[in-house]
Image: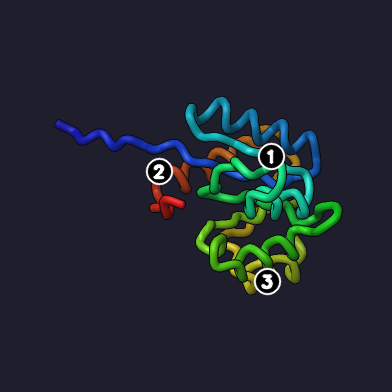
Amino acid sequence: MSEVTLVQPIEVLLVEDDPGDVLMTKEAFEEHKVGNRLHVVSDGVEALRFLRRDGEYADAPRPHLILLDLNLPRKDGREVLEEVKKDEELSHIPIVVLTTSEAEEDILRSYRLHANAYVAKPVDFDQFIQVVRQIDDFFVTVVRLPKG
């Protein structure tokens, strides 16, 4: 008799300004895992407002995982990463940098700012979907996340 592990759905915050990447990420989540909730904001200022439950985000859930693009309007992902990891209330939330940049300086800086992972976005649609699914799988089925 095999044991069945019930996977709890998780709240994921996607911080992404490219509508195409948002659409592909949503599609990967919808096809792959029923129950995980994907919340989307399009810039760094909105990300911090969501995380701090400010204004219109007063009732926002605390995400279990953040997927963060680096190149964002208003406040870039590097600044968001730094602010989140310095905030006592938010620093425990895993952050996966999901970006087009493959620059060594961005990779190094992201890890120095305590990113939990750095993933370069594939240009190919199918590969992009596969990468998002692997991230989702890893954080849902392998990693133990804090309850929030």
Circle on res. 91: none
Which sits earlier in the primary sequence, circle 1 or circle 3?
Answer: 1
Q: Quadrant of residue 101?
A: bottom right
Q: Residues within 10 Å of mark 1 (few under 14, many from 20)?
A: many
Compared to residue 60, the image places residue 85 above or below, namely: below
Q: Position of residue 119 (x, y in %)?
A: 64, 54
Q: Which residue is mark 3?
A: 108
Q: CA gap, disc 1 to disc 3?
A: 26 Å
> Residue shown at 75%/57% (left/top)?
70
Circle on res. 141: 2
> Residue shown at 52%/29% (left/top)?
32
Helix, strand or loop at mark 3: helix
Question: Relative to the observer, which residue lies in front, 50 or 116?
Answer: 50
Q: CA gap, disc 1 to disc 2?
A: 22 Å
Q: Nearer the viewer, mark 1 or mark 3?
A: 1
Q: Position of residue 107 (x, y in %)?
A: 69, 66
Question: Relative to the observer, which residue lies in front, 35 or 101?
Answer: 35
Residue type pointed to by label 3: Leu
Q: Which residue is mark 1?
A: 40
Residue type pointed to by label 2: Thr
Q: Residues within 10 Å of mark 2 (few under 14, many from 20)?
A: few
> Residue shown at 48%/40% (left/top)?
10
Q: CA gap, disc 3 to disc 2?
A: 27 Å
